[in-house]
Image (cartoon, rainbow, N blue to C red):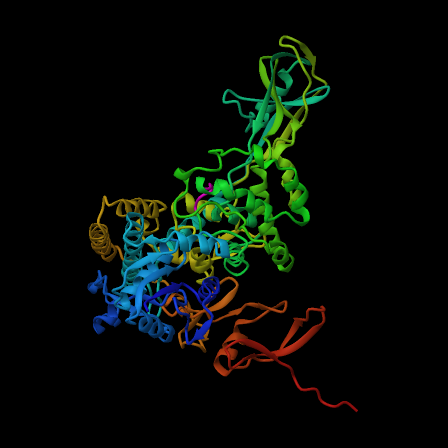
Amino acid sequence: MSKILVVAEKPAAGKDIARILGVTKSCNGYMENEEYIVTWAIGHLIGLKDPEEIDEKFKIWNVDDLPLPYDNGLKVLAGTKGQYKIVKSLIQRDDISYLINAGDAGREGLLIQSWLYRMCSNKHPVKILWASSLTDEAIKTAMEHLHDEKEEEFVNLLREAETRAVADQIYGYNYTRALTCLYGSSGTVLSYGRCQTPLLNLIYKRDLEIEKFKPQPYWTLNAEFNSFTASEIGDNGEVLKYMEKASADAAFQSCSRSGQVKVCKKEQKSQKAPALFNLAEIQNTMGKKYGLKPDETLEIAQKLYETYKIMSYPRTDSRYLSTDLYNEIEQHVKSCSFGKFESYIEKIDFSSFTMDKSYFNNNKVSDHHALIPTINSSIADVYDKLSEMEKNFFDEIVCSLIAIFYPPYIYESTDIIIEVSDRTFQAHGNVVKSAGYKETMNILQTKEKDKDDQQPLPDLTEGEILEVTNLELKEGKTKPKARYNPGNIVKLMNKYKIGTSATSANIVKTLEKRNFIELDEKKKYKTTALGREFISLVPDILKSKNLTIEFEDSLAKVNSGELSKEQFIEKIIIQIKGNIDKFKENAPEKKMGAQKSVGVCPVCGKEMRESSKSWYCSGYADESKCSFSIWKKICGKNIPEASIKTLLAYGKSDLLKGFKSSQGNSFSAYLVLKKDHSIGFEFPSRKNKK
């Protein structure tokens, strides 16, 4: 009897699918019954071969060897060979009728599975299980509507995914070697990333803008008219700022003590609930409200989807729902009818809810729809077990969905324009008529101040004369643009197509790990001394904000068939050849990494160097990415450089005084290097006192 082989991306997903399919017999690395075999990868099992695995001469970095050979085939990744052999043996069984690809439903998930089947020499037909959530209902529905891997949508997506993977390897390998050979001192690796480096440059440029910015005083003129205040505006309709005090004083002196109403316009306006969350928007919200970094938000999203199964697929770019969800959306909402959500859901009249293109739009849904809670009868029980931050995240998702069922927010907007001695003053105010969907904002712990919550204004008649009860010159100072923060960093990346919803969080995290950027005391991203040194050496063409835009635009043409994979790659190779020739001509005399060493890394043997907050291993940018570092400040004490040199040389520092315990008590100790390469304390022995 033939069987169907289901291959999930991770063990947890595989075991859930097995349970849903009634597969109970556990074996080594898979499960089986009379009809199905269910196995799994462990994320990435397969990767692209490195050039040096094809020819050993490439183990020695030489700029004259560039560009390196590419598309060198596939390999089994280190540490995954055991599970790979299991999957391969199952694929090659004679009793398999076809495979079901049950990997993550996205570009990366499709690539992971396809490479695995190719490496295992699969000859069976492949069907695709494409599910936006991992609930039992979603898996069952997806099993009833399997796709064929030869469908145009999946053929195009796979071609795009593989082209991107090969291109990124070409960028990384060639430019990392070129920069290292031409710009780095001995033992220093300058690791280049097609997405990381342009993002680092954007953060660095904002830092420079702030540092070079010189605040300038300015003055604005405000007039009070009994019950409200108006500001002088210029020809562009914006508040007029006087950059010279003499001009401001002259304006003040020229104003009479009365003004004539030129315009009094009252208008009733309505505002629908905003579109639902995609990953970038929820990362922005969680960063802004709760200070979470993009990777921390993504980690919560992944848990709600994969572990708790109470949210749809998280790595989505869409803020809309597909029309086929219209008939079941009521069930998604009612799954959340408990606790603080219940009273808000009870007010919804589902029978009067119609399909609105503001929320249901197939043209604005690509691989996955917006983030919504799943249809799951256990959500209330699961919610009780969530951490506080997981609840905050889920509250945002539920609130955004409930809001689309509420009526619009309605308010009366009033604009008044008054002329005072040939100068134009404007006042704007709103009066709430109906809270509408904004009522649901009360569910959330942190409520942002409503920008429409402004001063109420009186009814006035055009031509009416008003007394100026007070005239005021208000002084202010110009401010620089703010540094990027965990809330808006992903929006910045989206603007320049740096990464995708699946990769953006890891790009930021990698820059932090390499000690190129850090969060300052105000939780804003800024470049480190190491990051600045690196970006100053990278040629402009490799750090341009337009680099990734052009890349993604060309990649979209690969998906559509306008460009072949070969044409895309050949274009990159030609660019690399031209750029490396230019780099050779303009190689700087100063090499990065020439700064003094404080010792040798106990993990990998490379030099230890200094940054603003730590001593770090110079192998941070190697392929193996050594992450060993020692903080400059430990338990409230600044550690002297001499003590670090002693610690690295002998495994133990000199006796240091002035550490502070968590209770605030001072203590003295030696710093010691433990066997696991962590830093610990050794306390001086106490002599018996008579």
Q: Is 528 displayed left or right of 62 in the figure?
A: right
Between 309 and 639, the one lying in front of the other is 309
Q: Is 573 displayed left or right of 235 in the figure?
A: left
Specify whether residue 589 is in view.
no
Q: Main secondary structure of the magenta part?
A: loop
Q: Is residue 598 above or below residue 128?
A: below
Between 510 and 658, the one lying in front of the other is 510
Q: Which corner quadrant holds the N terminus?
A: bottom left
Specify whether residue 6 is in view.
yes
Q: Which corner quadrant holds the C terminus?
A: bottom right
Q: Which residues are magenta?
A: 317-322
Task: Tell me where residue 608 appears, x and y as whole percent.
Answer: 44, 72
Tally of numbered tags: 0
Residue 320 inside the magenta-drawn segment: yes
Residue 448 inside the magenta-drawn segment: no
Task: Tell me where residue 209 appears, x and y as whole percent.
Answer: 46, 44
Residue positioned most to the front: 1
Task: Tell me where residue 54 appears, x and y as whole percent.
Answer: 22, 70
